[in-house]
Image (tube, grey):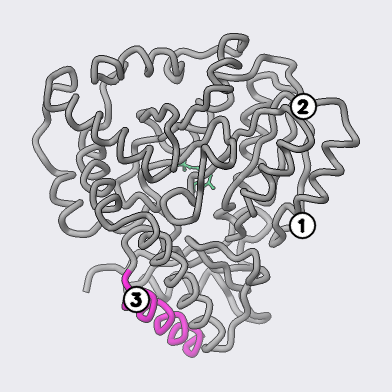
Amino acid sequence: MPLNLRIPGPTPLPPDVLEVTGGPMINHRGPLFKEIIDRMTRNMQTLLQTEGDVYFTTSSGTGAMETAVVNVLSPGDRVLSVSIGTFGDRFGDLAEAYGADVTRFTTKLGDAAEPDVVRAAIRDADPYKAILLTHNDTSTAVQNDLAALSAMIHAESDALILVDAVSSAGGTPLAIDAWGLDMVATASQKAWTAAPGIGVIAVSEKAWQAYEQSTMPKFYFDIAQYRRFLEIGQPPFTPALSTIYGLDLSLQQLVDEGLESVLARHSDRARQTREGVKRIGLELFCEERVASDTVTAIKVPDGVDGIAVIAKMRDELDVEISGGQGALVGKIWRIGHMGWCEPEHIDDCIAALEKALARD
Ligand SMILES: Cc1ncc(COP(=O)(O)O)c(C=O)c1O
């Protein structure tokens, strides 16, 4: 049996996506590419529940986050970075690297950002130009209530809402237009069931207005270039064609399946994982009410070498899970269940974890 890759991205690819990913190169300035990019754009808009602009960058998710920041902000702009983990910290670091004046709001690891607490942070300060949110922080496997957070922000301020949806989009409810989100970043290798290499950025009308004022330096990720080229069905630069072939197929499959079914599948798999973890006597890292639909974090029990268990599962049992990051190294395990994930993949993973622990 091939390795059961249960890390929270890159995700395993089903045989048909894998096969098209190995397809022949085409002219990215020809009619076939136009057909592909037009279809991908339409399908991504459907899945992200937006009629606004959607662009595909040749980058990982961090490049899409950078696209969000550099196109709507200027050096010195006041930004509130709401972080619930490593990736929220990264979003704040990124804005700071480009000269934004970043105020950090951080929660205890394992907690979500509660709208009432963030509200107080907004009320207590001068107005912010933008608020950075992580929808699902993969480092702690905690999912923010993005609908409630964005509704609160709209009631309290005119700030732009920039969202890291890298590990949520395609696996967790996300309604860009209904929730009034301005820049939303995601990436091919997560719930979208494609190889790494393509970032996705959704851009609202309000974000386009902010673009006109933005003076942060930008070139490769300048959304005006993407807009201009998409009008003629082309990318501004040579794209990662192999990844695009797989992403195109996978997006079409997700649209054909229907968003409701895709999301129900993810929450079923998340529930199955949490139940399996508890059944073998382990404890979840966060409260179930904030637990992610795409990744589950588990506490490493006292006296267990968490890193050795991961190695044993990978080397002896053909299942690979992730450990913690930063302050959580050795303290948690993380099981990915986004994208292509059948119930048997989770059963196999939980069984391997139980076996590895019994031998520890
Ligand atoms: C929530 C979140 N944000 C950002 C990133 C960064 O994405 P990438 O590694 O594709 O640059 C990741 C990757 O795991 C992520 O999970």
Tally of numbered discs? 3
Q: Main secondary structure of the magenta part?
A: helix
**Crowd tier of the residue under label 3, counting other residues whose Cα lies within 10 Å: few below 14, some 14–19, many 20 or above:** some
Residue at the image position 47 percent from the left and 86 percent from the top: 354
Q: Is residue 283 left or right of residue 152?
A: left
Most extreme residue toward the left, as rendered?
24
Residue at the image position 19 percent from the left and 24 percent from the top: 34
Span colored in magenta: 342-360
The amino acid type found where label 3 is placed reads Pro
Q: Give the image location of residue 326, x and y in percent.
A: 64, 53
The amino acid type found where label 1 is placed reads Lys
Q: Residue 208: which numbered mark, if any? A: none
Most extreme residue toward the right, as rendered?
124
Circle 3 residue: 343
Closest to the observer, 332 or 77: 77
The quarter of the rendered structure image containing the N terminus is bottom left
User: For the residues marked 2 and 1, what is the alpha-carbon distance in whole angstroms?
Assistant: 23 Å
Asked if 42 appears above or below 289 in the picture, the reply is above
Circle 2 residue: 128
The amino acid type found where label 2 is placed reads Tyr
User: What kind of element bears circle 1?
Assistant: loop
